[in-house]
Image (spheres, rainbow, N blue to C red):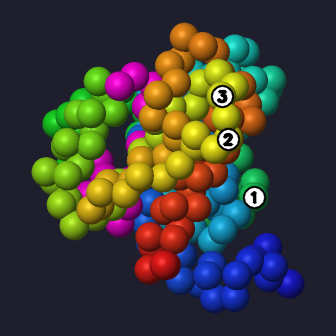
Amino acid sequence: MTIFDRNIPESAKKLSKFTVGIAGCGGLGSNIAVSLVRSGITKFVIADFDLVEESNLNRQHFFQSDIGKPKAQALEDHLKKINPNISVRVIQKKLQQTDIKEIFNDADILFEAFDDASSKLWLIESWAESFPKRPIICGSGMAGLGEFSDIHVRNSGQLHICGDEKSDMSLGLMAPKVLIVANLQAMTGIKVLLGD
């Protein structure tokens, strides 16, 4: 028996061939990574500059014992507790536009998991310029309560945007909605990688 025996047949084997990049290890990134490792992804490049704070625990895949640790390092530890046979390259720094080509050069796909809109924009632009044929999966609009029917995926070439595309973080963040968007990003990326 393996942890992937109940996955879609052959999906984990196919997904294990890909390298996934995750820019940001907070509410979106940490939960995306957990879903991906449970789905069969075995090669990760994860980047975040921040430390785990208690106020993160309402929506991020961290625990009280992680408080004060670098998010990327704590996330690597959690992923390896799910599947110890994975490779994770941890980048602990605040990403800049000029970093993307070098840091994520090996990534077949990138998951955007930043907080602010301006950072999301330059990340998308930098990725598209550096790797025009590689997909990027973004999150936009996961705050407040809202209607589940407002959450969607918008596809435009290699760009895939998940969320309601309108709610603002000033509304506050609740775990269910953040995790829905994170898992929608993960599922969208899985479908893209599997050619569905």
Instruction: Give the percent coordinates (x, y) of residue 105.
Output: 26, 58
* Residue 83 within the magenta-colored segment of the rendering: no
* Residue 115 within the magenta-colored segment of the rendering: yes
Which is more N-terminal, label 2 or label 1?
Answer: 1
Main SS of residues in magenta: loop
Residue 84 visible (yes or no): no
When asked about the image quadrant of residue 59, the answer is: top right
Q: Contact, CB < 8 Å: mark 1 with mark 2?
A: no
Instruction: Give the percent coordinates (x, y) of residue 22.
Output: 45, 47
Residue shown at 65%/28% (left/top)?
Answer: 146
SS label for mark 1: helix
Magenta span: 103-117
In this view of the protein, which residue sits in the foreground, 130 or 79?
Answer: 130
Q: Which residue is mark 2?
A: 148
Front: mark 3 or 1: 3
Asked if 43 appears above or below 54 in the picture, the reply is: below
Image quarter (top left, top right, bottom left or bottom right) of the N terminus? bottom right
SS label for mark 2: helix
Q: Which residue is mark 3?
A: 146
Image check: 67 left or right of 41? Answer: right
Q: Contact, CB < 8 Å: mark 3 with mark 1?
A: no
Q: What's the distance in space between the residues labelled 3 and 2, CA to CA?
A: 7 Å
Front: mark 1 or 2: 2
Q: Which residue is mark 1?
A: 82
The amino acid marked with disc number 1 is: Ile
The crowd level at tag 3 (other Cα within 10 Å; few <14, some 14-19, many 20+) is some
Q: What's the distance in space between the residues labelled 1 and 2, CA to CA?
A: 29 Å
